[in-house]
Image (cartoon, rainbow, N blue to C red):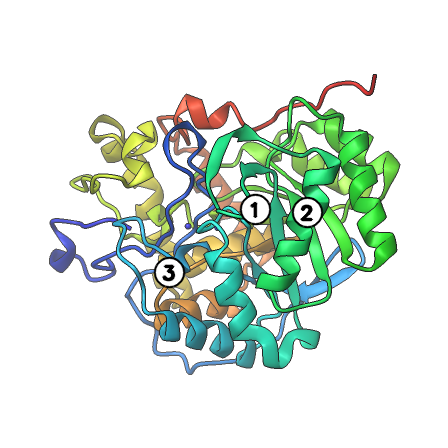
Amino acid sequence: MENLENKNAASSFNRRSLLKGGLALAGASLLPDISTAAPGQLTTAPEKDLKGRRKLGHLEVSSIGLGVQNMHRTYQTTIPSRPEMINIIRKAYEKGVTLFDTAEAYGPFECEKILGEATASFRNKIVIETKFGWNIDQNTGQRLPGLNSRPAHIKEVVEGMLKRLRTDRIDLLYQHRVDPAVPIEDVAGAIKDLITEGKVLHYGLSEPGPQTVRRAHAVHPVTAIQNEYSLLWRGPEETIIPLCEELGIGFVCWSPLGVGFTTGAIDENTRFAAGDIRGGESRFSPENLGNNMALVKLLKNWGVKKGATPGQISLAWLLAQKPWIVPIPGTTQMQHMLENIGADEVKFTTEDLKQFNLDLAAISIKGMRLPQAVLNFSNVEAPAKG
């Protein structure tokens, strides 16, 4: 899943100087599956292991996962230290994280390689989820136009994934975006073949149209849906989360911290570096940032009440929504990873949630979550089977 340079970084007590991130696909196919960790404001609470566990379908995972998209290149196009990224992944496992998220598109290929190297010694004790679906040449890594979920291509992609991840199976394989040229029955059928072969254990969909979910689920039970979901973007509440509840499907939140916004790392004076995809998101435009800062203010106030950071409040709120919702914040800094998993210790009472949601209802977020060219890849329905 979630980077910028902030001119006023030194002036805020809880702001990171840089948000960690990963570059998605170039141009219209930029993938915003990026989430950032909680802000630099640290609590005085002792560091604790992540004990919480949740179910995605029948698959048990830690209550908070780790997205590794950012680990090959940040939003500012800087290259993080590979040894340190491996250290962060290994430390996350030591602290109780068992769900690790990546995709062939991140790099391409590089984040799968980093994750495979980092987790080789404890592979059998974790859940690795990765994603296919973009049109990427499997030999060169060249990004070709559009999407590709043709069954033969899926099977070729999985062979490469297994090598990069240094494993014999993928615990949870997602279609990264629905391919408008391939019936979902063909996609699910190909994955069902891979499940029969033992190369894939569970499968899911990312940002799908709801009827596509139903059709896929009819071929083989869908374990999880992965969508953007945070206090900044609550779109899945309308259709997808109720659908997951109806069908017994787990829900994984990418960008659970609103690409850094809900951590307090962005303010009304923030301007984004060239190449940072958030610069093209109207919710972060100068005319909308001032209005949207009301959400950050709310999170800071609740952080004081709960002895937590704004980012931890954000993650705790997500965890409080449903017992089968799992956020996967990403980061390239050790302390932010530790802060994120600390959100599992932050609990909302029934009365807390009632009051928080009343306060939240008074805030109206202005601007779109993504440029329209990127949104065009979301909520797509696969074509009918001929």
Q: Label 1 neighbourhood size at 10 Å, few (<14), some (14-19), many (20+)?
A: some
Query: Which residue sits at x=64%, y=28%?
Result: 179
Q: Secondary structure at mark 2?
A: helix
- Residue beneath disc 2: 156
* Upstream in sequence: badge 1 or badge 2: 1
List x then y, in percent, for residue 352: 52, 54
Q: Secondary structure at mark 3?
A: loop
List x then y, in percent, for residue 56: 73, 55
List x then y, in percent, for residue 168: 72, 66
User: Residue 300: which quarter of the image?
Assistant: bottom left
Instruction: Give the residue type at disc 2.
Output: Glu
- Residue beneath disc 1: 138
Q: Can residue 346 be seen in the rendering of this structure?
A: no
Residue sitting at the far front: 139
Q: Label 3 neighbourhood size at 10 Å, few (<14), some (14-19), many (20+)?
A: many
- Residue beneath disc 3: 38
**Pointer 1 and pointer 2: residues touching (CB < 8 Å)?**
yes
